[in-house]
Image (cartoon, rainbow, N blue to C red):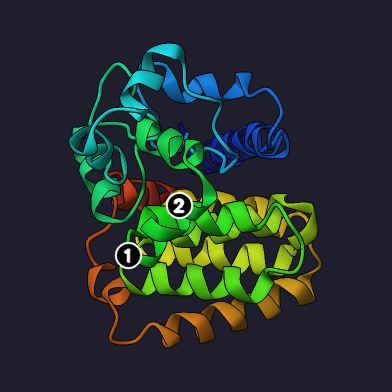
Amino acid sequence: MTGIGKWIFLVASVVAIGAGTVFLINRDDTALEGRDKQDAPSKDVNLLSVDVDDASPSRPPTAARSGMLSGGGAVRGKLEHGYAWNPSRPGDAASEEDAAWFNSRGYPGPEVYEYLHSIPQVELKRLADSGNVSAMAVYAQTLAKQPGNRSQILDILHQGAAAGSVYSLKMGGDIFSAYPAYRDPVMSLVYYQLQARAGDHAGYVQSYIAQQQIKPEQVLLANVMTEQMWRSFAGTQLLARSAHVRPGYEKFVETAVSSNNNGG
């Protein structure tokens, strides 16, 4: 495929993914049939077709899973955080290696995500206050359902990211792109660009989508704010881990750059 052909394919992939993402996020607390794409086994994953799944609340647990959620402390402990690799239910992970990277960056696996959304908010807050970075991001998402929580949401996301949670950055982008009380396309772009800087190439895809929705001067503002916020993480786990990027990141970047160098 020629350079320009690769670039056209990249753009087409981005737009297609973006359309699905917006649909899923905007469904919020309604029926989440679209979420089933996360539960399906992964097929061959094209490096340009990055899964950028939504941050909308997951559907209520099935009857079988409800038993797990009401189980003993050991069972609940396993559901409170982590991203375990499960080929039959991979979530956003393309491989076991990908799942391990997600696990180390605060992303919750599908069952953890469902569990965190199933527990009472007071319990979710307790987990967040204890330093559980996945719970912190989901708690921020929960707060985004009501107006008047912007400062608290920003503080929680910053704390989670400082502890090394790239998921907190992704959640920030999702909150400011999809939740009506907090819709702010500039802030959304800032968070998605930070997600990419922190090593998750899905952030590049979401950044591209976000840039199509705002004016050039807003993109400039977002770029400045991204740099400012990135520097605010100096000395934190986020920057310390940023050199260890997500599997597929380097190939994604190389393909995009080579398509441009080849006349794309």
Q: Is residue 98 visible?
A: no
At numbered mark 2, what does the secondary structure look like: helix, strand or loop? helix
Residue sitting at x 73%, y 38%? 26
Residue 60, percent from left and from top? 54, 25
Q: Nearer the viewer, residue 17 or 115?
A: 115
Q: Say few, some or many: other residues with alpha carbon within 10 Å of mark 2 (under 14 / 14 to 19 / 20 or more).
A: many
Q: Is residue 146 visible?
A: yes
Residue at numbered disc 1: 130
Q: Is residue 80 above or below residue 24?
A: below
Total numbered labels placed on residues in the image:
2
Q: Nearer the viewer, residue 150 or 251?
A: 150
Residue 245, percent from left and from top? 27, 57
Q: Is residue 250 above or below residue 1?
A: below
Q: Quadrant of residue 130?
A: bottom left
Name the amino acid type tagged 1: Ser
Q: Quadrant of residue 1?
A: top left
In-image side of 32 versus 123 (left or right): right
Residue 180, percent from left and from top? 79, 53
Residue sitting at x 32%, y 65%? 131
Residue at numbered disc 2: 124
Q: Say few, some or many: other residues with alpha carbon within 10 Å of mark 1 (under 14 / 14 to 19 / 20 or more).
A: few
Residue 89, percent from left and from top? 34, 21
At numbered mark 1, what does the secondary structure look like: helix, strand or loop? loop
In-image side of 16 versus 5 (left or right): right
Residue sitting at x 24%, y 67%? 243
Q: Nearer the viewer, residue 215 or 71?
A: 71
